[in-house]
Amino acid sequence: MAASGPPILVVGVAHVVDLAAPLRRVLGKRPLDGIAVELDIDRFRALSAPAGTSTGGGGGQPMLMRLWGMVQRRLGDELGVGAGAEMRTATQIAAERQLPVLLIDDPIRETLFRLLHSLSLKERVALFAGAIVGLFLPGELVGRQLDAYQAEPTAYTDELRRAMPGVAKVLLDDRNEHMADRLVEARGRGLTRIAAVIGDAHLVGLCEALQRRGVGSERIPFSELNAVRAP
């Protein structure tokens, strides 16, 4: 299918790295009709709530969601940024420029429901174990892992597909397809100049999903964005 309209700018980020300055440089100078973020409405509300404000309490959330949320918060604090800082920056830029924020991710509860009901016992144990181990990983080790990821990102996603194919399908492949559908739908409403801020592991898959729908994309991977991060 031939691409039509301007390409969608797809920006890859890491959820525990301070990318506020490079995001502002990239998004601030672009003519845009909207900024899309890898969030659903619940996560958007939680991210937008003032510090210390409850948005419904974590007690009703699935255990895995609570564990991974704790991991991201701890690592974000240890590395000097709050969890989700890059998505908060993207939504702030949209507000400053009076642009609509497009929430293109699946509802987190639906994603976790699909995940837990599609995994083998081995994959469930590995996923929970990884979340628990993440609670105790030192920030310096995470920083080194991010450096290694930047050098060869496809090696990490390839290893995930080999070790836990069910996790890769639900957390990467399915969500890439759904996010592409929502971006195409937004273009159908006249929002042709869109920047999408997503986790870097989704970058290649989302761009390929857009291409299958006849929509071109321009990629800025996490490695490029992080390389121009202000000291």
Image (cartoon, rainbow, N blue to C red):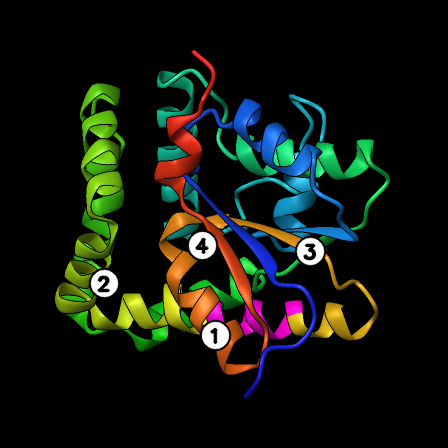
Identify the secondary structure beneath mark 4. loop
Residue marked by disc 4: 62
- Element type at mark 3: strand
Q: Earlier in the sequence, mark 4 or mark 1?
A: 4
Q: Which of marks 4 and 3 is nearer the N terminus?
A: 4
Q: What element carries label 2?
A: helix
Q: Does the magenta stretch include residue 195?
A: no
Q: Residues within 10 Å of mark 1 (few under 14, many from 20)?
A: some
Quadrant location, the N terminus: bottom right
Can residue 181 be seen here? The reply is yes
Q: Mark 3 points at which residue?
A: 194
- Residue at left offset 44%, top offset 34%: 225
Q: Tell me whether the residue at label 1 lies in contact with that at label 2, contact meaning CB atoms closer than 8 angstroms.
A: no
| Quadrant hosting residue 185 | bottom right
Q: What residue type is labelled 3?
A: Ile
Could you tell me residue 144's position as x and y percent? 19, 27
Verify CB contact (< 8 Å) between mark 4 and mark 3. no
Label 2 vs label 4, nearer the camera = 2
Alpha carbons under labels 4 and 1: distance apart? 29 Å
Q: Residue at x 62, y 61 (%)?
A: 104
Give the x, y percent position of residue 6.
67, 64
Q: Which tag is nearer the camera, tag 4 or tag 3?
A: 3
Residue to which mark 1 is pinned: 209
**Alpha-carbon span between mark 1 and mark 2:** 27 Å
Tell me the residue that label 2 is attached to.
124
Q: Are marks 4 and 1 in contact (CB under 8 Å)?
A: no
Mark 4 or mark 1, which is nearer to you? 1
